[in-house]
Every structure is written in structure tokens, then in C-alpha cells.
Amino acid sequence: FRNKSGYKFSFENSIYVEFKNMGMGIGNLLLKELIKKSSKNKNIKTIIAVIGNNSTQSIKIHKKNGFKKIGILKKIGFKNNKWIDSIFLQKRSLPLLGRISRGPARAQPFAPLETLFAVLSSPHGQLAR
């Protein structure tokens, strides 16, 4: 989330779906998988979503998956020749109390593209186990 030691247990997620593939549930599937993987990593306690341009669909998907809106930075970005807001949402992936790994937190790449295709081609949008 931020490159300072005090934030080493917080990570920002970024999921981008190509415009032609929007509305197919891909973003939701990717976010669910990200949350699942994050919950198994002792170094991830909080996931932050920073959503620009007031993307109502992205906000809806994040809220559906347990993220809470925590704030707005007004007119903080400039895109397509206009000022845009950044909306912050947060999800605690694990309880904040308890054992914390002392090693450095390292973000891992999400899932290979093959995994996404496996999810999309399965009958119920889930990976075969």
C-alpha cells in the first residue's frame, strides 16, 4: 500500500478488466481469488482498494466482497482532461491480533492468465480442485 515499514501488512489491490469483457463477472472472480489467497498469507492483514473516477461497478464489487468505504480524496487525480476523486475501500483479511510473521511482507503476483481462463471456462466459475 505504501512503501514505509509501518504499512508492511497493508496491500493495495488493482484489478483491471478490459472494457469489452466488463459485465461478465471477471472482476468479481478475480477479487474473490485475491481475497482467498490474501487470507492465507500471514503478512497481509489489510487490503486497500483505491478506485478512481467514481467507478460504481468497481465499488459495488468490492462492497459485495466485504470492503468498507473509508474515505474520499477529492479531485486528487487528473484523467481525460478532468479532475477525479479517489475512493478508498478497506477489507481486513485476517484478525489484527495474533501472531505476525516478522519477515518482510512481499506481494506475490496474482494468478497466471491460465488460471483466469480455467475459472471462466468452468461450469460455475470456480476452479476445479
Image (cartoon, rainbow, N blue to C red):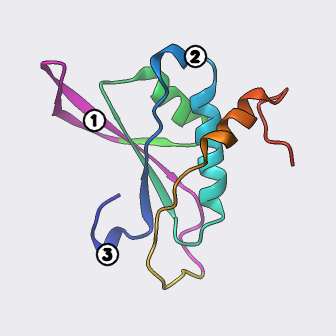
Q: CA distance from mark 2 to mark 3?
A: 38 Å
Tags 1 and 2 in contact by the CB under 8 Å rule?
A: no
What label sits on residue 51 in the rendered view? none
Residue of label 3: 5
Label 1 or label 3, whichever comes before in sequence order: 3
> Magenta span has 7?
no
The residue under the point 35% across, 68% down is: 7
For residue 35, side relative to residue 109 (left or right): right
**Which residues are drawn in magenta?**
71-98
Q: CA distance from mark 1 to mark 2?
A: 22 Å
Task: Check disc 2 and report its element: helix, strand or loop.
Answer: loop
For residue 86, side relative to residue 68 (left or right): left
Task: Check disc 1 and report its element: helix, strand or loop.
Answer: strand
> Magenta span has 85?
yes
Q: Residues within 10 Å of mark 1 (few under 14, many from 20)?
A: some
x, y percent for residue 32? 64, 42
Residue sitting nearer the eye, 71 or 39: 39
Residue of label 1: 86
Residue of label 2: 23
Q: Quadrant of residue 78?
A: top left
Q: Amino acid at mark 1?
A: Ser
Label 1 or label 2, whichever comes before in sequence order: 2
Residue sitting nearer the eye, 97 or 127: 127
Q: CA distance from mark 1 to mark 3?
A: 23 Å
